Image: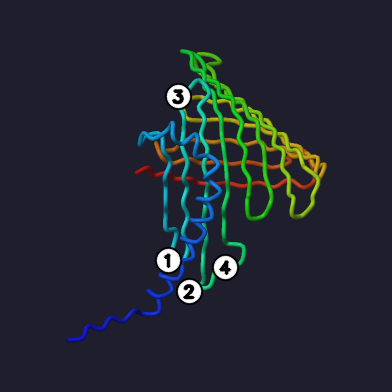
Amino acid sequence: MRCCFSFGAAALCQVKTFLAFMTIFKTACTLFAILSSLTAAARADDLLIWSPAKLSDQSYKATMGFRLPAEWETSAGADIALASTKGGALLPDSEQAMLWGRIIRTSVTPASRSQQGASVSVDTLRGSGALTLSRSRSWILSDSLDMQSSRSISVQYDAVEARQASVTASQALKLIHPWTGTSLSAGTGVSNASGDFSSTVGVSQTILPNLNLDASVSNPFSGGEAGSVNLRYRVNW
């Protein structure tokens, strides 16, 4: 007796895409081997990061790494991804093999919460990288108002394009009325790559627990201002 199995074209394309994904996965695992000495100290399930996802019939993504809880919480890992056409051919520039690392320190008091940290990412396929330093703080300003502030500075480098390292700095303030769900925000940013100075002012109103109305204006003090209004609904599961 003979048994014959046949696969449709769509199934065959998915198999080809999966095999290509596994090839990228093996490459990322090789790069990730430099972290092996640290992962040995983080074998508990809640300390390991493993998040594979099928974004569509022809695209896949996975994040893997580890975290080490301490005063300065440390995490590191790799992101890998690819996408293909319906014919099974890889889409140009769809592959991703990104190494990343973060350190974060959080301080909490009855009236405030602050966080500072640093993150680094390296695109191993395209030769680019970034280093970001950030700091944020939220505190009770009065009986009816809360305040949030944030600052960050990022250094980016692209070895393939032989571009000079660029530095971008930004800061933002937000005033919040927690009883009505209303907030006012203002932010600025500057980059040495273009020399442009940008600013944004905005207002946000909570309509329902998961429904927000946002309105913002970019560069309100220049001739090139632009505004936007968004209605956002958030669902958690």
Quadrant including the N terminus:
bottom left
Which is more N-terminal, label 1 or label 3? 1
Q: Where is mark 1, residue-wise?
A: 57
Which residue is nearer to you in this view: 1 or 63?
1
- Give the number of the mark in front: 2 or 3: 2
Q: CA distance from mark 2 to mark 4?
A: 10 Å
Check disc 2 and report its element: helix, strand or loop.
loop
Q: CA distance from mark 2 to mark 3?
A: 51 Å
Which residue is nearer to you in this view: 160 or 199?
160
Check disc 4 and report its element: helix, strand or loop.
loop
Which is more N-terminal, label 1 or label 2? 1
Which is more N-terminal, label 3 or label 4? 4
Disc 4: CA contacts within 10 A as few (<14), some (14-19) or many (>=20): few
Instruction: Point out residue 214 in the picture as x, y percentages from the top left corner.
Output: 55, 41
Instruction: Point out residue 198 in the picture as x, y percentages from the top left corner.
Output: 74, 39
Disc 3: CA contacts within 10 A as few (<14), some (14-19) or many (>=20): few
Q: CA distance from mark 4 to mark 3?
A: 49 Å
Name which quarter of the figure residue 203 lies in.
top right
